[in-house]
Every structure is written in C-alpha cells, then in structure tokens.
Image: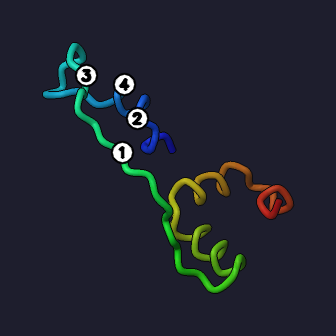
Amino acid sequence: MQWGNPDTIQKILVYGGSNDETLKDNHFERGVVKIPVLSPNHYWARTSTKSGSVIHAIQVIKEPSKIEA
C-alpha cells in the first residue's frame, strides 16, 4: 500500500541489490485512478473477488458483520 510514497520507495529499492546504494532518481506522478463501476455494490463485488489485499483481509476477519462494515 506504500508504493505511492516516495520516501518508502527510497528506502526499499536499491541498485544492483546492494544495501549500500539507494535509488536516487525516482519520479512520482500524482493523479486520479478511475475505476469503471456501475454502483458501490458493483465495486465491492469486483474488489472483494479480484483484489488480493481485500481478499486476504476478508479471510483474516472472517466475521460477516465486520466485513460488511
């Protein structure tokens, strides 16, 4: 979830696998991601079956009332 954070990327990525060198020339472009959906329910149905992080969260939570919330 932190791939859009330049500071996080600066800490994670290194050249050639060496932990001594950091990525120096990173560029981030900010914008809006438009996801075509028909309704909030359509978005949920799509996201809860296609997004790995959401699927994992659902599996961890397990309690339907908490998942709905």
Pointer 4: residues within 10 angstroms few (<14), some, or many (20+)?
A: few
Residue type at mark 3?
Thr
* Residue that label 1 marks: 28
Residue 45 placement (x, y as % from top left): 64, 76
The numbered mark, 1 or 4, whose residue comes first in the sequence reads 4
Pointer 1: residues within 10 angstroms few (<14), some, or many (20+)?
A: few
Mark 1 and mark 2: Cα distance apart in space: 7 Å
Q: Residue at x 37, y 33 (%)?
A: 9
* Residue that label 4 marks: 11
Is 33 displayed left or right of 26 in the figure?
right
Q: Where is residue 15, by image quadrant?
A: top left
Circles 1 and 2: CB atoms closer than 8 Å = yes
Q: Where is residue 7, by image quadrant?
A: top left
Residue closer to the observer: 47 or 49: 47
Mark 3 and mark 2: Cα distance apart in space: 12 Å
Q: Residue at x 13, y 28 (%)?
A: 16
The numbered mark, 3 or 1, whose residue comes first in the sequence reads 3
* Residue that label 3 marks: 22
Q: Is residue 23 above or below residue 20?
A: below
Q: Residue at x 24, y 28 (%)?
A: 23
User: From the viewer's perspective, is the residue at label 4 or at label 2 nearer?
Assistant: 2
**Disc marking residue 6:** 2
